[in-house]
Amino acid sequence: MDTHTVVSIDRKSTEADRQAALYQIYQQVLERQPYEFERKAIAKLEKDFLKGKLGVRHFIGELVVSSVYLNSFYLGCSNLKFVEWNFKHLLGRAIRGNEEIAKYMDLLMMKGVAAFFQEILGSEEYRKAFGCFTVPHTRDVKFYESPRNYLQTNILQHEHVGQRGKVIPTIYWQQLGLDCELGSCVLPEEALNIPEAVNHSVHSVVERQNALVQIYTQVLERQPYEFERKEIIHLEQDFLCGKLDVRHFLGSLVTSNLYLDSFYHDCSNLKFIELSFKHLLGRNIHDKEEVVVYTDVLTKHGTHAFFHRIFDSEEYRKAFGCHTIPYNRDVKFHDSPRNYLQSDLIQHEMIGQHGKVVPTLYWQELGMNCETGTCVMPDNETHNPQNTEMAKAKEPDSRSLNEEIEELLQMLQNSDARQVLQSMNENQRSLIRNLAK
């Protein structure tokens, strides 16, 4: 049986009929059969349903407010996507329009999930379509009032949990300029056939193992050690089986101790921000305004809010979306040669290579020399053997300069200043100007 099959039971139905109905309910509402550990949470519900104490509508009403359903479709999911999935599961169609979204979003946020489900299961539409004894199913094309509504429902019926993420409902694909026909939402910048984006996109289960290696290379700058994998083993499993898309996997990875121990603890906030931009946006910090904004978020609200700010940004959405691994972006992205130079420098910087303190944005302003692999402050340069040799090489010039200054001072002491100035050549006049500054 598929989700288009009409399955009904009544008070006279046998236990075998109810078993078949129970299987179909799970296929329609959960999009799968419950796991063994999940059945413990709904064991009493199943028992009451199989004994005939609960009808289909009442059983579904209890199922959708259970942890089994909410963990799959509500927690860690956008409200808009949650509303869309509930229309798919309980009404057999996609959302019709913005008015329907506004109504149910308001109900969900103001009164919670219980009131939200009561509104759907108690609606006139549900009563006429399924009543108390028919399992919800994908309804016929004749039901839809426009080709667009039919198309949205048809696409939605073939979507599985995590296949296109938990963010964008089909009603917004066209408005956002998304191409989601192939099983993953491709954002405008990804659709430009940029080689880097194509190589880093994840569209099938086969590519996920290779994608995982690429994610670690981009974000951790290495592969995790064996003892570190124990902390993120559940994340890896969810990603490899398709429960998490790239964006959600990254969101959990960067807030883990594995990432924070490498780039946050024992690291200055400025350097942490710079490295996070490198890993998640594929570029360096633009300017001081960007530093101020993200430093303020980090210091006042913590790392979780900081990463939310990056992942929810318009830049990240357009550049990578939900399914593309961040990568070092092309020079066309940079709005100035300096931004390009700074991004190029940081892309070749490894952990600890230039320390964990000073971002490239401040190298030039502080007069630091970081090209050799470690940042050297101006005062420390004199202790460098190479600098000592350079200083010795410049000693003759310094001596001749001092002799020239002494000569000028003597001229000024023994003669009228105006006459002395008239007799000076251009180099001597330039020297006097520099001394006066």
Image (cartoon, helix red, strand yellow):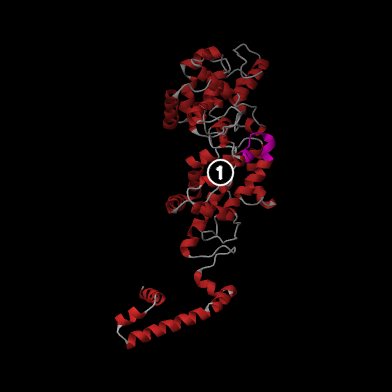
Q: Secondary structure at mark 1?
A: helix
In the depicted structure, whether residue 341 falls above or below residue 27: below
User: Which residue is found at the position 52% from the left and 13% from the top?
Assistant: 143
Specify whether residue 152 is in view.
yes
The image position of residue 344, as x and y in percent, is 56, 53
In the depicted structure, whether residue 382 falls above or below residue 128: below
Which residue, given by chain and number where applicable, does mark 1 sit on?
Answer: 251
Q: Is residue 378 magenta?
A: no
The image position of residue 2, as x and y in percent, is 64, 19
The residue under label 1 is which amino acid type? Answer: Gly
User: Which residue is found at the position 52% from the left and 32% from the top?
Assistant: 168
**Magenta extent:** 198-209
Badge 1 density bin: few <14, some 14–19, many ≥20, Cα 10 Å: some
Farthest residue toward the bottom? 414
Specify whether residue 255 is in view.
no
Nearer to us in this view, 411 or 264: 411
Q: Quadrant of residue 25?
A: top right
Nearer to us in this view, 400 or 383: 400
Q: Is residue 202 magenta?
A: yes
Majority secondary structure of the magenta segment?
helix
Quarter of the picture containing the C terminus is bottom left
User: Which residue is found at the position 58% from the left and 47% from the top?
Assistant: 328
The image position of residue 112, as x and y in percent, is 45, 31
In the depicted structure, whether residue 32 falls above or below residue 286: above
User: Which residue is found at the position 42% from the left and 23% from the top?
Assistant: 99
The image position of residue 258, as x and y in percent, is 61, 51
Q: Is residue 25 left or right of residue 379?
A: right
In the depicted structure, whether residue 356 falls above or below residue 23: below
Quarter of the picture containing the N terminus is top right
